[in-house]
């Protein structure tokens, strides 16, 4: 099942549990606006290259639309639509005053030079500048994009609309980015893990962890879990899959990677088969990479007691059912990886006020938001007699539905 079908299915289940009016249910599912643009740029060798860019703005009942822009060869309208919808529910679960959006350009960023990426980003911004804005739609980095990409969008947008640092989040610190933003999603994952384990009388300290994906989210989650006394016993990414049952020395691994080393060449662990990573024995499994990695084929073999969905849509609905029957507790993506959008909200607030926060305040506020959201999800699970995924979805959908009704959706 693709991401759009799975997200829509979760939404419909939540709508049924909440007893939503069928017309309202249909209205909440339909995107506010879908944008498709052709971006043609001169390449460094003088030839022209054309790329297709998308921006889906899903819902703005609770505030400006918010969501990342990804550069990836497999960006397609269905995926962007699903992720935009997911952002609507995620921002509502996190209680930040946003709606959902998502965008992307179908390209391979690794095949483009820095100047080609800049030209592509500026052309894309020129095509959508009148559809995004500080109080309309606020992009952020995603797969294949970073703070530099946001700096180019901010600069290009400001040529049309004047100095507008709050038009994007995830910017470099020197251009109004927030302290703590780089670690935000990984730190949010750690706070979410703490909250869930505490429910079961456990803690990060003394628990064993397997992490799939060692990019921004996976590496920060690994470092912060290690600092809290958690034992990362296996992890993997495209550069290799490694394990050490005594626990991997995460700071040493980070030093190795920052010096250009690959995971498979790290001396503090043994290389293992990548296909064994997700089914490795552990207390907590963290999928931090792509979607759909937990499916009906590998779900019966999962040995983890808890799964924290740090990636977007890592668990197929079929796998979800199998894991539920096995008694595996799954903490859903729309809560578990919300740390990024929460700190993006803090960045936006700081930019609008023109008053920047200390990193300690950012982390303290993030902790507060993650804990509050977890308590609200738990309350929803109790009132609706459902699992954590449906608890999170009913919480998010209910908040968006209430805002939509209060604003007068039938007028």
Image (tube, rainbow, N blue to C red):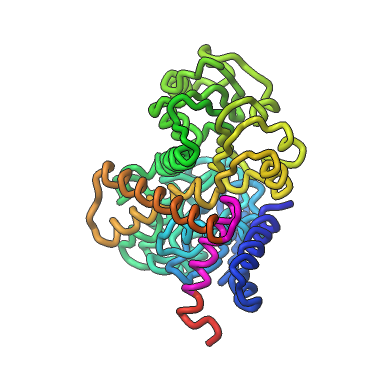
The residue closer to the viewer here, 262 or 359, is: 359
Residue at the far right in the pictured view: 297
Q: Which x, y percent locates residue 281?
A: 63, 25
Q: Is residue 264 above or below residue 101?
A: above
Question: What range of the chain is rendered magenta?
Answer: 384-403
- Asked if the stretch drawn in magenta spans residue 397, the answer is yes
Identified at 40% across, 39% down, the residue is 183
Which residue corresponds to the image point at 35% horizontal and 59% vertical from the top-left?
Answer: 166
Where is 64 relative to 180, above or below?
Answer: below
Residue 311 horizontal side relative to residue 373, left or right: right
- The magenta stretch spans residue 175: no
120 to the left or right of 293: left
Can the viewer see residue 154? yes
Q: Is residue 177 left or right of residue 79?
A: left
Q: Position of residue 247 (x, y in %)?
A: 50, 18
Which residue is more in the foreground, 22 or 237? 22
**Residue furthest out toward the left:** 355
Residue 13, horizontal then vertical, whole percent: 66, 62
């Amino acid at each position: 099942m693709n991401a759009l079908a799975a997200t829509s299915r979760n939404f419909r289940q939540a709508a049924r549990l909440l007893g939503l009016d069928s017309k309202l249910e249909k209205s909440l599912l339909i995107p506010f606006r879908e944008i498709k643009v052709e971006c043609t740029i001169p390449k460094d060798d003088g030839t022209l290259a054309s790329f297709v860019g998308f921006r889906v703005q899903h819902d703005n009942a609770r505030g400006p639309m918010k969501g990342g822009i990804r550069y990836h060869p497999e960006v397609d309208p269905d995926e962007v639509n699903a992720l935009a919808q997911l952002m609507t529910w995620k921002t509502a679960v996190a209680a930040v005053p946003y709606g959902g959006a998502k965008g992307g350009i179908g390209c391979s960023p690794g095949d483009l030079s820095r100047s080609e990426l800049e030209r592509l980003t500026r052309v894309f911004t020129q095509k959508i500048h009148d559809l995004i804005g500080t109080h309309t739609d606020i992009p952020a980095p995603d797969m294949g994009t970073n703070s530099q990409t946001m700096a180019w969008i901010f600069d290009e947008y400001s040529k049309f609309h004047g100095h507008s640092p709050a038009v994007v989040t995830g910017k470099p610190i020197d251009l109004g980015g927030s302290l703590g933003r780089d670690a935000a999603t990984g730190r949010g994952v750690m706070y979410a893990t703490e909250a869930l384990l505490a429910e079961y009388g456990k803690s990060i300290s003394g628990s064993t962890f397997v992490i799939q994906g060692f990019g921004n989210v996976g590496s920060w989650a690994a470092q912060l879990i290690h600092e809290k006394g958690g034992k990362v016993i296996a992890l993997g990414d495209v550069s290799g899959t490694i394990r050490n049952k005594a626990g991997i020395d995460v700071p040493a691994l980070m030093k190795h990677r920052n010096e250009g080393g690959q995971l498979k060449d790290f001396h503090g662990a043994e290389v293992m088969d990548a296909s064994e990573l997700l089914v490795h024995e552990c207390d907590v499994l963290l999928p931090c990479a792509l979607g759909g990695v937990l499916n009906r084929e590998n779900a019966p073999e999962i040995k983890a007691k808890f799964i924290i969905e740090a990636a977007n849509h890592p668990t197929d609905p079929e796998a979800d059912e199998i894991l539920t029957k096995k008694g595996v507790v799954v903490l859903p993506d729309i809560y578990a990886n919300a740390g990024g959008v929460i700190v993006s909200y803090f960045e936006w607030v700081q930019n609008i006020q023109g008053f920047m926060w200390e990193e300690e305040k950012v982390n303290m506020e993030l902790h507060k938001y993650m804990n509050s959201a977890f308590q609200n999800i738990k309350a929803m699970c109790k009132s609706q007699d459902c699992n954590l995924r449906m608890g999170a979805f009913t919480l998010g959908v209910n908040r968006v539905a209430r805002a939509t009704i209060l604003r007068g959706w039938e007028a």
